[in-house]
Image: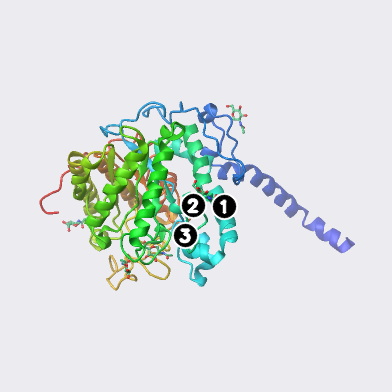
Amino acid sequence: MGAGERSCLRRHRWKISLLALLLVAAAVVVPLVIVKPWDKNTSKDKDHPSFVPGPQIPINPEQPIVPSKDDTAKCNAYTPALNQPFDYASGELKMRGVNLGGWLVLEPFITPSLFDPYIKDGVVDEYTLCKHLGLEAAKALLEKHYANWVTEETFIRIRDLGLNHVRIPIGFWALGGLNADEPYVPNLSWAYLLRAIEWARKYGIRVMVELHAAPGSQNGWNHSGRSGAINWINGTEGAANAQRTLLYTQQLATFFTSPDYAHVGPILGLLNEPAGFMIGGEPIKSWYRQAIDVFRTATGAGKGPWLIIHDAFLGLGSWTDLKTSGERLMLDAHQYIMFDDNLLRMNRTTQLQFACQNWGSDMVESTEDFGPTIVGEFSVAVNDCAKYLNGVGMGYRWDGTFDGAPPKSPDSTCTNENTASMYDAEYKKFLSDYFNAQIDAYEQGAGWFYWNFKTETNPLWSYFDGVDNGWIPKDANNRGPGFCVPNGYSFSKPATM
Ligand SMILES: *[C@@H]1O[C@H](CO)[C@@H](O)[C@H](O)[C@H]1NC(C)=O
Ligand SMILES: *[C@@H]1O[C@H](CO)[C@@H](O)[C@H](O)[C@H]1NC(C)=O
Ligand SMILES: *[C@@H]1O[C@H](CO)[C@@H](O)[C@H](O)[C@H]1NC(C)=O
Ligand SMILES: *[C@@H]1O[C@H](CO)[C@@H](O)[C@H](O)[C@H]1NC(C)=O
Ligand SMILES: *[C@@H]1O[C@H](CO)[C@@H](O)[C@H](O)[C@H]1NC(C)=O
């Protein structure tokens, strides 16, 4: 170091001292700011001192996940411990939960970062991603994602938010049995599911595992594994794929009937969103009948999990004749506003009213006519602005770039819709009302699961973001008077709607 440099250093010494001071201050302040309350080893975790927050480790496939025999955990004061019965039959005790979506079944809009590097190669779903990468690279990518998207901290936070259930979508590839032309990574996701179930068990959260992706694709959407044609019931391989799906139904039924899993996994989703509007109601109903039969044969009569069937977009009222097909059946509908031009175009007041009166009355009627009914997916999104929600380069209904229809209103843009800090107080108040209106409606039935617990970039689709930004309550069990009743809305449809 020469003299010139030393004097230069002297001249700048005050700046260096200031910098050092700032660095020290940052070292103290930044961790305080970025360490979220749920990361801390707070008194809330005195029951679970064994948990050490930190990066999650991949699973060693040589080391099987051993189920704990301890089913005594209780997630909160309102929910029975796992080894006590949860009264699904009466629907009086509400299921309050989130989906762990975009995890064991990928979805471009939930984790765009997994897809962005390969969009140019034509990758649009898990099928094309795995095919493009090849088995080993796909395995490496997925393993990293599986180990980090859902961790033990996820379950602690879910417990702390007053939730009592999680719905975990899986693909058929979790259970192996792939055809040679199916590029999915077999079995790996099953190990991560089992590890997550142990965390759920530790924190007293009940798990609904559900088959989200069937061989051939039951709806042609990317979250079925493969977007494009429906080759399930429909199509040349449709009958064979529907038959293969029954084998997975049987495997899941058997697995969750075992005493190791019966308490923590008391409900199973048969199949997510089969496209009834394309395949037809009767073929799906007939497959449901077969599946219910396969399921109860595997569990034994009077035993095993509840089975939840999706309404296949044909309306909750379309399934009443199935209720005699088996015991312990539950019905599931998914309620979204942003994919329907009519609902999207309603003003906010009408949307809130619609949630209370239409979705609420659907739950009341279905509970009477069918039995326990849930909403297994919903969000507070009132626009379709989330990146990749409609597909790469597809545009958005909201701003008029999707299907030629005009924007919601002349000045509707998607520019600030995916950034919570850009929402004004009035918008946040609406989101809060819309959340509460939906919860009020869905608790006219047996309960609800928000889609999704988190997303990479879309706050309206993230329960955690909703809590952090104040439009979702911090405790799902203590959330004030709700929306519908205080605002004079009943849970019955007005004659005009
Ligand atoms: C968390 O707190 C418990 C006591 O409440 C303590 O035994 C444990 O060592 C703490 N863990 C960490 C990682 O600080
Ligand atoms: C995958 O899991 C299934 C079901 O548990 C099993 O039968 C099969 O042997 C497994 N395949 C591999 C490659 O481990
Ligand atoms: C149904 O299957 C046929 C092939 O047999 C296919 O051409 C058609 O696109 C499928 N329908 C849907 C909605 O995917
Ligand atoms: C909202 O729409 C309804 C039904 O079209 C209409 O009656 C009402 O006046 C509108 N409210 C506002 C605030 O624009
Ligand atoms: C995802 O699925 C939607 C339909 O749910 C489809 O329109 C879209 O093209 C898919 N997204 C991507 C990135 O392929």
Q: Residues within 10 Å of mark 3 (few under 14, many from 20)?
A: few
Residue 483 visible in the shown view: no
| Residue 361, x across and y down, in percent | 19, 45
The kind of residue tagged 3 is Asn
Q: Residues within 10 Å of mark 1 (few under 14, many from 20)?
A: some
The N terminus - image quarter: bottom right
Q: Earlier in the sequence, mark 3 or mark 1?
A: 1
| Pointers 1 and 2 in contact (C-beta within 8 Å) | no
Residue 126 visible in the shown view: yes
Residue furthest to the bottom in view is 404
Is 496 situated left or right of 393 in this image?
A: left
Q: Residue at x 37, y 69 (%)?
A: 395
Q: Which mark is residue 179?
A: 3
Q: Residue at x 59, y 56 (%)?
A: 140
| Residue 124, x across and y down, in percent | 45, 66
Q: Which mark is residue 176?
A: 2
Chosen colour scheme: rainbow
Cβ of disc 2 within 8 Å of ligand 2?
yes
User: Which SS class for mark 2?
Assistant: loop
| Residue 65, x across and y down, in percent | 55, 39
